Amino acid sequence: MSFPRRTHTCGALRPSDAGARVVLDGWVASRRDHGGVLFIDLRDRYGTTQVVFHPERAEEVASRAQALRAEWCVAVTGIVRERPAGAVNRDRPTGGIEVEATELAVLSESAVPPFEVDDRVEAALELRLKHRVLDLRRPTIQRNLLLRSRVLLAIRNALAARGFVEVETPILTKATPEGARDYLVPSRVNPGTFYALPQSPQLFKQLLMCAGLDRYLQIARCFRDEDLRADRQPEFTQIDLEMAFVEEEEIRAELEVAIGAAFREGLGLAVPTPFERLPHAAAMARYGLDKPDLRFDLPLHDATPFAAASSFQVFRSVLETGGIVKGMAIPGGGAWPRKEIDALGTKVAEFGAKGLATLKVEEADLTGAIAKFFEPALRARMREAFGAKAGDLLAFVAGPPAVVNRSLGELRNAMGERLRLRDPKTFRFCWVTDFPLFEWNPSEKRWDSAHHPFTAPADWTLKGLPGDPGSILSRSFDLVLNGVELGSGGVRIHRRDVQEKVFSFLGIGPQAAREKFGFLLDALEYGAPPHGGFAVGVDRLVQLMLGLEGIRDVMAFPKTASATCLLTGAPSAVPPEQLAELHIRPVLP
Ligand code: ASP
């Protein structure tokens, strides 16, 4: 079919084009009939232009135009007219003109859409995902995808200019332990065996360093079969990199260049570098979380010494069982109504805290039900240590360190929100460094890698093992933006004996290590260079750049929280013959 080719996009025309004969191709966004004069908003990726059909100037065309409905795809030929001053639409770049139609070609009619394709109309999520094609026509989602494209290009260009080589690693591969469940793909030609979809290209990128590629980059799709959790996607994209002959600072410096390019090209913003560096232990002490939101301060304070010197039995018995007491001063919280203070208790309880104790900060003293357990001099010292001012509320949690830190850290974030200290237009990056190498897994009663088992220990050799495994520091670090973990990475183990020591400490015996990671151990046998790398989550990065609540609308075809694609119906049943070919017999409940 031949059709009138556009001379301009729907976002291009300005008053300086007045008088020109143009062709626009696009979709009918809306129609308004003003007593026979028909106005159409014509939309494409670039914008929206008003088209007017005058029955007295182009009768046949105007009468055909009466049939136009939302989402029809059309080509309009017409003359650009400057709008009179009173009719200018200042909300859109083409608002100074309209196109007076002289011809109309309908390229495709549309069925009545299930929802209005309009940024102001919030259709139900299920409906939007099912009809994602229509949903993707919305200007905001197109803006999101365009930003994503610019960000990826900027990062790719910035890193390519610095000598990074783009290498694609296999999608059909062997399970790698990033801590989540694998998606498995049955092999037809090797009955009873399975590939795993990569949770990350971790081991391949390390092999590429052993192979001498020196600087590797990939915009890598990763797959993790995790349990339902809001705002997680089973497949996501990482900017994955690895470098040989480096230590932590060199990796961080490259990422600062890449992130800087993303913000500059994506948003026209200069993000100040270097980003702040914050050791993990300091982050936990001051903010309670390993991904602190540094857009605001509201620090946590250690109240353990005050609790120990008090006569408050609740606090003292927690200390006796190895617990700690920490707290924070909430500006102005002393004046909040009871209900709101109770809500703070509910918040910390969500994260396992047994309760929230509070004191009000008055001009001269601290008051409240537990004040009497603290001597006046102790109250004065506590007030000073917390940096509290009259009108503040002191809030305390007592318990095991992990619970105290987590619950107060989350409370701190909630207070940041409540006090409007979390400006989505402010971008505060930080590197959280010096993570522990291992962390205790209380439910499995064993030590796990805090990052992954390939992370190098701070001392390279693991002299400290067995000792106190929890006190051994690693060479891994995270990138945090506004309280969200954007990525992680670190320096890797490049010595076979050290790698084997870690495997054996994690309960992966020599035989299992050989079976699972023989290819890595072999590579470490032949002159492996010191190396390290990092991965940044693209979906999160773009989400935060746009100030969005979730990652769904920075992906073209996202899945639901239960990992289904409402558009295609995946995952779906397959015919028994196909299963048989794969040597699979279903065992359905
Ligand atoms: N492979 C790691 C991840 O996906 C990142 C890294 O260590 O480079 O989380």
Image: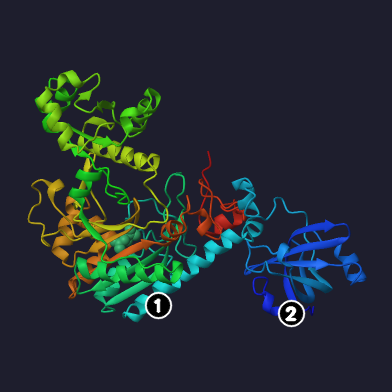
Task: From the viewer's side, name the closer residue of 253 and 90.
Answer: 90
Residue farthest toward the front in the current orientation of the protein: 85
Q: Quadrant of residue 575?
A: bottom right
Q: Is residue 530 above or below residue 431?
A: below
| Residue at figure coordinates x 31%, y 31% from the top left | 352
Residue 471 position (above or below residue 63): above
Kind of residue at badge 1: Asn
Q: Amino acid at mark 2?
A: Arg
SS for dot 2: loop
- Say if 220 sits above or below 315 in the image: below
Percent x, y for residue 320? 12, 26
Residue 265, given in percent of the width and then of the height, sits at: 43, 72
**Location of mark 2 (residue):** 5
Q: Residue at x 65, y 59 (%)?
A: 133
Left/right placement of residue 11 relative to residue 465 reads: right
Q: Name the image colouring.
A: rainbow
Q: Is residue 306 rendered to the left or right of residue 68?
A: left
| Front residue of 109 and 506 | 109
Q: Earlier in the sequence, mark 1 or mark 2?
A: 2
Rounded to the nearest whole Å, what is the CA distance between mark 1 and mark 2? Answer: 33 Å
Is any atom of residue 244 visible in this view?
yes
Asked whether, in this view, residue 98 is left or right of residue 564, the answer is right
The residue under the point 80% across, 57% down is 32
The answer to which quarter of the image holds residue 477 is: bottom left
Label 1 sits on a secondary structure element that is helix
Q: Which residue position is annotated with label 1? A: 157
The crowding category of the residue bearing disc 2, from other C-alpha atoms within 10 Å (few below 14, some 14 to 19, many at least 20), is: few
Quadrant of the rendered image holding ligand 1: bottom left
